[in-house]
Image: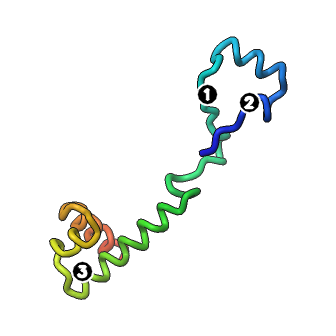
Amino acid sequence: MKYKKAQDVLPEELVRLLQNYVSGDYLYIPRKEGEKKSWGENSGTRDLLKARNIEIYDKYKEGATVEKLSEKYFLSEQSVRRIISQARKYA
């Protein structure tokens, strides 16, 4: 999320009014209903993790052990087992 200067996007009158409540602090303004985005949607992180998890499951099916996968992907064995379990549900 990028910060925007209030004086660059809001009318001067509104900026002065807001300064009565939060002068010099950061203010988060939530998105309108229906415009919310899921976690990782903007950065692409969600897609990267999905691809990684598919790769982990494929390697597991090819015979890689949970221990080796956890070492290769720097994950706990429990996390690898969870990924494999979830992938089985959708396979």
In the rendered image, the vertical position of residue 37 relative to residue 54, given as above or below: above
Mark 1 or 2, nearer chain start: 2
Image spot of residue 15 (x, y percent): 77, 22
Q: How is the image coloured?
A: rainbow
Q: Which quadrant: the N terminus?
A: top right
- Residue plotted at (21% across, 61% down): 76
Residue 84 sits in quarter: bottom left
The label on residue 27 is 1
The span from disc 3 to disc 1 (Cα, nearest Å) is 46 Å
- Residue plotted at (26% across, 69% down): 85
Check whether the beta carbons of the residues at disc 3 and disc 1 lie within 8 A of each other. no
Mark 3 or 1, nearer chain start: 1
Front: mark 3 or 1: 1
Check whether the beta carbons of the residues at disc 1 and disc 2 lie within 8 A of each other. yes
- Give amino acid for label 2: Ala
The span from disc 2 to disc 3 (Cα, nearest Å) is 51 Å
Mark 2 or 3, nearer chain start: 2
Drawn side of residue 34 relative to residue 68, left or right: right
Q: Secondary structure at mark 3?
A: helix
Image spot of residue 42 (x, y percent): 58, 56
Q: Which residue is mark 3?
A: 60
Q: Which residue is mark 2?
A: 6
The label on residue 72 is none
- Give amino acid for label 3: Tyr
Residue 41 sits in quarter: bottom right
The span from disc 1 to disc 2 (Cα, nearest Å) is 10 Å
Residue 73 sits in quarter: bottom left
